[in-house]
Amino acid sequence: MAKQKKAPRPKAVTPKGFRDYFGTEVTERSEMLQKIAGVYHHYGFDALESAAVETVEALGKFLPDVDRPNEGVFAWQEADENDKGDWMALRYDLTAPLARVYAQHRNDLPNPYRRYAMGPVWRNEKPGPGRYRQFYQCDADTVGTNSMAADAEICMMLADTLEAVGIPRGDYLVRVNNRKVLNGVLEAMGLAEADPKRDDVLRTIDKFDKVGADGVRQLLGKGRLDASGAYIDGVGLAEEQADPVIAFLTSKADDVAGTMENLRAAVGDSKVGQDGIAELEQMGALFAAAGYGDDRILIDPSIVRGLGYYTGPVFEAELTFEIFDEKGRKRQFGSVAGGGRYDGLVKRFTGQEVPAVGLSIGVDRLLAALREKGRMGGTPTGPVVVTVMDKARMADYQAMVAELRQAGIRAEVYLGNPKNFGNQLKYADKRNSPIAIIEGGDEKEKGVVQIKDLILGAKIAESATLEEWKERPSQFEVARTELVSKVREILASQQDDSDA
């Protein structure tokens, strides 16, 4: 009888486009999300946690990826007797589920409905450096009102959120624009709503931050040579047709009034364009009334990203401090959040247009920004470790841990093999523990414990002389009853040293 082959062992590898997150990363993200949620809650928004899975029908039109099934989502078909079950998919953002939730529960929800949501989303797209198929989003939306006060409030809340998580004023700017103004520009160019060249113009405008006004003018016309020397074909518009676009992109003046005047010249007699300018003026007045100056929120027509998706005001939070890229070149950190008005959110479900405005914060990018600012990413502090000198006295050690935990101190008992005491201290070092507690038989008999300051001990071991070591010992013997107070004292001194 042939020997049966063993099944091959599975490879211990992360699926392509995904990654694992360990202790510090998870903790930092959780703490940041709590701060963001605090601001949202302070503004009167309610939390919503919807299902991670939606029907493909409910998700509607999502981000296309023509090389993959179901255009960029992770989808599967539910089995039934006739193999005609519903197609299900992991959500690709937090906005599509909001549309379904609002349509389904609108009779029970307040109007307007203000909600925030945080959680992972999944996109079946080709992964790349820093681009994963699962990532976190952090959204807030107001559904059911056309008031520009809702749009202005979202922008102000975004500014407050950035400051709450540790981005100081002066290191960020929320820039605001309006899709209606751009529609007015397209009308001034003589491009009807059904003209296929409108999409080409939008794509060209989106390159403004890379190629500048002259580059946009060339791409709207015959074309231009890019940096590599390749020739990029243009849209083919006449020279005078490009004038309104350039006027729009370069309309930012020294003050809001001047910017509005330039925008009016760019849109000409277009009613939709004039409506968009009026909305920007309303928002500017609300920002000023609430004390949000141009150093925090700025009307800026050069913000064009996402204009194809939105129907009214759009905004983007940009971090303005400089960092070094992988080649050692200085550059600004860039965008960490964005949003705008997208009326028609629920129309697919109800047939009635429902106005909405919202924002989405890129959690991973914001975390990276905080690390760049030195607000996160330091060496994490582990728990106080109570070592085990006698397995038969585990109850004594658990009692110590319980006292420390009840006092609000993170602590654990060593649960490995206690035979080799050196291994226990190595474990504490690997956990980056600040303190180790030692109580052998002699200490138990005397009613004392040994408290070892591991952080101070490491510093002494690095550079201290014998005399300095004697003056600042890193191990203390204290009465068992003083365990908690002494641990608190050492932790406080460690914190003071790290802040110095």
Image (spheres, rainbow, N blue to C red):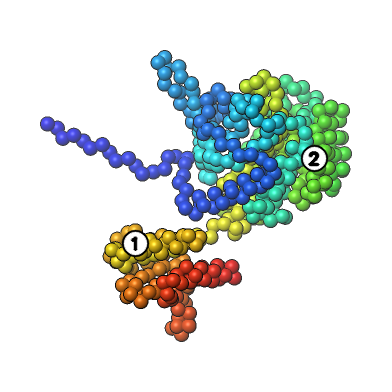
Q: Residue at x 64, y 55 (%)?
A: 166
Side (left or right) of 132 relative to 154: left
* Residue count near mark 1 (Cα–Cα under 10 Å), binned few <14, some 14–19, many ≥20: few
Q: In front: 36, or 232?
A: 36
**Which image quarter is the C terminus in?**
bottom right
Q: Is residue 395 above or below residue 77?
A: below
Q: Residue drawn 66% across and 52% down? A: 164
Place of residue 333 in the rendered image (x, y in percent of width and height, measured from the top left): 64, 51
Query: Disc 1 designates what residue?
Result: 395
Element type where label 2 sits in the image: helix
- 464 or 358: nearer the eye? 358
Q: Earlier in the sequence, mark 2 or mark 1?
A: 2
- Camera-nearest label, 2 or 1: 1
In the rendering, at what x and y percent does residue 285 appear?
A: 83, 42
The residue positioned 43% from the left and 60% from the top of the image is 402
Q: Quadrant of the N terminus?
A: top left
Which amino acid does the dot numbered 1 rest on? Ala
* Rendered position, 142 above or below 79: below
Question: Percent from the top left, x then y, of residue 6?
Answer: 23, 37
Residue under label 2: 283
The residue at the far top in this view is 82
User: Which residue type does callout 2 highlight?
Assistant: Met
